Amino acid sequence: LESDCPLLSDAMRRNVFMKMNANIKHRKRSPNIWEFLVRLLISFETNPALVCWEQKDKYRFKLIQPKLISNLWSSRSKGKSSKEGSYSNFARALRYWYSQGGLELVEDRQLIYQLGPLGIKYIKELQ
């Protein structure tokens, strides 16, 4: 994956996949897929090369390199096989978060997503 996109430094990878508090007896957890996208959005290394704001005031963003982003997401665990993740599987995982509040549906737009209430709260905490 590094050869596909040299801007993905080791430091950026650690930051994007950094474990978070799960609020359960100080247990750490990996970021959810929408939290991963928020981290890409706030990173100067990946915004606007991989993902960029479409309408920042509405928390709407566009995936510039969806295949690379889905491969990065699928490579998050060293214990998993090195299969490249398909964008269709990645998009399916994103759609799950429409009902959970992490993302909201943007109709009739390809590769455009919008943060939901959980996503907006999370990005405000990070800034």
Image: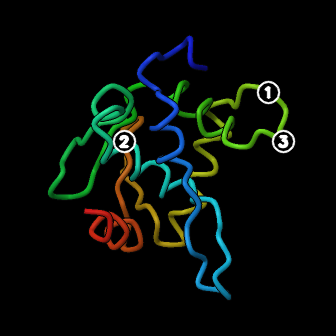
Q: Position of residue 34 (x, y in %)?
A: 49, 56
**The C terminus: image quadrant:** bottom left
Mark 3: give few (<14), some (14-19) or many (20+) Cα within 10 Å.
few
Give the left or right position of residue 3, taking residue 7 as reference. right
| Disc sitting over residue 101 in the figure | none
Q: Which residue is mark 3?
A: 79
Q: Residue furthest left?
A: 57
In whole angstroms, how far apart are the C-alphas of marks 1 and 3?
A: 9 Å
Counting residues from the start of the chain, the first of labels 3 and 2 encountered is: 3
Which amino acid lies under the numbered mark 2 shown in the image of this protein?
A: Ile
Q: Nearer the viewer, residue 46 or 66?
A: 46
| Disc sitting over residue 112 in the figure | 2
Q: Position of residue 106 (x, y in %)?
A: 36, 51
Q: Residue at x 40, y 43 (%)?
A: 40
In whole angstroms, how far apart are the C-alphas of marks 2 and 1?
A: 27 Å
| Disc sitting over residue 82 in the figure | 1
In whole angstroms, how far apart are the C-alphas of marks 3 and 2?
A: 31 Å
Q: Position of residue 48 (x, y in %)?
A: 27, 30
